Image (tube, helix red, strand yellow):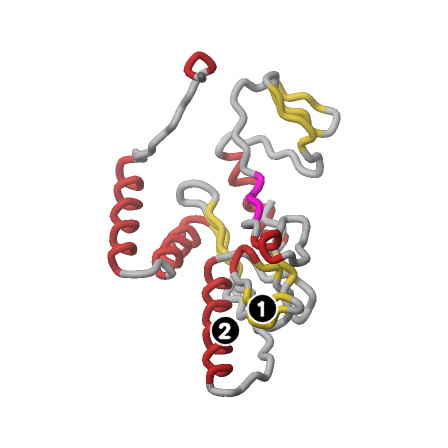
Amino acid sequence: ILPNFAQELSGYASKALERLGVTVELGRPVTRCDAEGVVFGDTHLPARTILWAAGVAASPAAEWLGAAADRAGRVLVEPDLTVPGSPEIFVVGDAAHVLRPDGRMVPGVAPAAKQQGRHVAATIKARLAGDTTPRPFRYKHDGDLATIGKRAAAIDFGWIKLTGRLAWWLWGLAHIYFLIGFRNRLAVSLSWLWIYLTGQRSARLITQGDDDRS
């Protein structure tokens, strides 16, 4: 659980999930899902409803560009975020596989994408001014934040680690802060406040049974 976090925060996350009634199974990847349930390791878990939350694949930018990609489909970019062999093409955000100087990958989070966007903008501006010197991207990691249900979260800023209610409030404030525009921040704040006070969520569900298919 939360492998990028410190060990004590990972342990906190596991216990928080267990308090919510979640049974945590680690080290046994899912090998099959069918109408009867889920198979992981040598265990078959009967289930009629399966919610899959194992991440997403990158956009097919690597296919469009004919560029090398990692197993998730992210483009393997140069240190300056350009496509190898095509210095006029930049790839940023979730579509890019970007390495830090220590060899670790830059996380696919919004703050990293915003930093990459600013870097590309500065590079293009410099090129237009006649400076074509490659500028390697340097990611500034401000910390890791994760929420684990209501009033439970984990925060790792390196120099300080927080859990529980305080971490949960800081997680919410950080996400609102990074939204673009006052209107979006206000809308999300009011929506979250309503959910917190009432416990009610608005959701749109698209359902279709076998009999509805043509």
Query: Which residue is the extreme one toward the right?
Result: 42
Q: Quadrant of residue 211?
A: top left
Residue 13 lies, in percent from the top left, at 55, 44
Query: Marks 2 and 1: in contact by CB < 8 Å?
Result: yes
Magenta stretch: give its range.
Answer: 54-58
Residue 26 lies, in percent from the top left, at 67, 37
Query: Which residue is the extreme one toward the bottom?
Result: 130
Residue 10 lies, in percent from the top left, at 59, 48
Q: Quadrant of residue 14?
A: top right
Amino acid type at image mark 2: His
For the point 30% across and 40% down, the residue is 195
Q: Is residue 25 left or right of residue 209?
A: right
For the point 64% across and 65% down, the residue is 99
- Secondary structure beneath dot 1 equals loop
Q: Which mark is residue 167?
A: none
Q: Which mark is residue 119?
A: 2
Residue 165 lies, in percent from the top left, at 41, 49
For the point 54% across and 37% down, the residue is 53
User: Foreground: 171 or 63?
Assistant: 63
- Secondary structure beneath dot 2 equals helix
**How packed is label 1: few (under 14 Cα within 10 Å), some, or many (20 or more)?**
many
The image shows residue 128, relative to residue 209, as above or below, that is below
Q: Is residue 171 left or right of residue 77?
A: left
For the point 68% across and 69% down, the residue is 102
Q: Is residue 56 magenta?
A: yes
* Mark 1 → mark 2, Cα distance in angstroms: 9 Å
User: Foreground: 191 or 122?
Assistant: 122
Amino acid type at image mark 1: Leu
Looking at the image, is mark 1 or mark 2 earlier in the sequence?
1
Q: Which residue is mark 1?
A: 81
Q: Could you tell me which quadrant the C terminus lies in? A: top left
